[in-house]
Amino acid sequence: MATTLEPGRLEQEQSTRVTGLPTPADPAPLGLAGFALTTFLLSAKNAGWTNGTDAWLGYAFAYGGLVQLLAGMWEFRNRNVFGATAFSTYGGFWIGLGLYVKLVAPTAQNGSQVDNDLAWILLAFLLFNTYMLLWSLWVNWAVFGVFLTLEVTEVLLVIGFFNGTTNIVKAGGIVGVITAIVAWYTSSAGVINGMVGRPFAPVGRPIVRVGSRPAVASSDPFPRS
């Protein structure tokens, strides 16, 4: 008796017959969600919207850090070098930033030393983010939007921390919240598109053609090359 396959099951069963292993689930929505939430918490603090302590710190270790790092490792399994590099790097960023705040910042003699440290840390990641922003042109509009808003966030924070300008840091926090929202949308699109097996929530086409092939829309926020 013939049965109707659920969305996405046909591709999975074909892969299973060829490799003997089921097609792994896409880790990109999870990695984007971990990045988005932790970015949102820290950015809200930078924007001066919160009145509590460092609520972002625990999530820098657990969600934006460990979970995003795991998503990066799973992207290696998917042979997705862009996703693996992005998630692993920013997972390491959150863990490293958390360790800096807990272990190094308390040894500073004054707040200006911490600001200077943060400026150099963010400058280093700004350099990384710049070339990932360029290569995201080969992914899709949604991912490009994540890296573009993150680029602006990091530029503002670098300037603000180097100059000790609170208002510029607050502006960076506001753009950081926008970055988190864009990342959350891209994550949610990856979840629903993976569930229904088609581009239900649009993520856009690659902005730059991949080789000689025409740019086509994909349901995957970080499609494999």
Image (cartoon, rainbow, N blue to C red):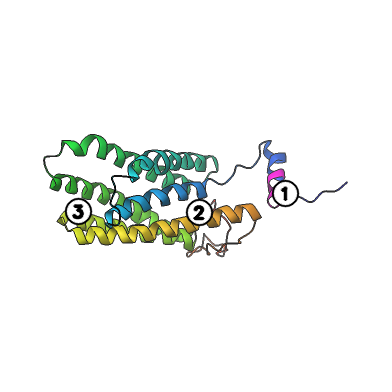
- The residue located at (72%, 40%) in the rendering is 17
Which label belongs to residue 187?
2
- The residue located at (18%, 49%) in the rendering is 115
Judge the density around disc 3: few (<14), some (14-19), many (≥20) Cα neighbours within 10 Å.
Answer: many
* Kind of residue indicated by mark 3: Phe
Secondary structure of the residue carrying numbered label 1: helix
For residue 82, say whether it is visible.
no
Where is residue 103? Give x, y as percent.
24, 34
Q: Is residue 48 above or below residue 92?
A: below
Q: Is residue 197 above or below residue 141?
A: above
- Label located before the other in sequence (3 or 1): 1
Secondary structure of the residue carrying numbered label 2: helix
Indicate yes or no whether the magenta region holds residue 145.
no
Judge the density around disc 1: few (<14), some (14-19), many (≥20) Cα neighbours within 10 Å.
Answer: few
Left or right of 106 in this view: 195: right
- Label located before the other in sequence (3 or 2): 3
Q: Is residue 156 above or below residue 122?
A: below
* Kind of residue indicated by mark 2: Ser
Left or right of 202 in this view: 106: left
Which label belongs to residue 77?
none
Residue ID for mark 3: 161
For residue 54, say whether it is visible.
yes
CB within 8 Å, label 3 to label 2: no
Indicate yes or no whether the magenta region holds residue 11.
yes
Secondary structure of the residue carrying numbered label 3: helix
What is the span of residues highlighted in magenta in the rendered image?
Answer: 6-13
- Label located before the other in sequence (2 or 1): 1
Q: What is the quadrant of residue 196 in the picture?
A: bottom right
Residue ID for mark 1: 10
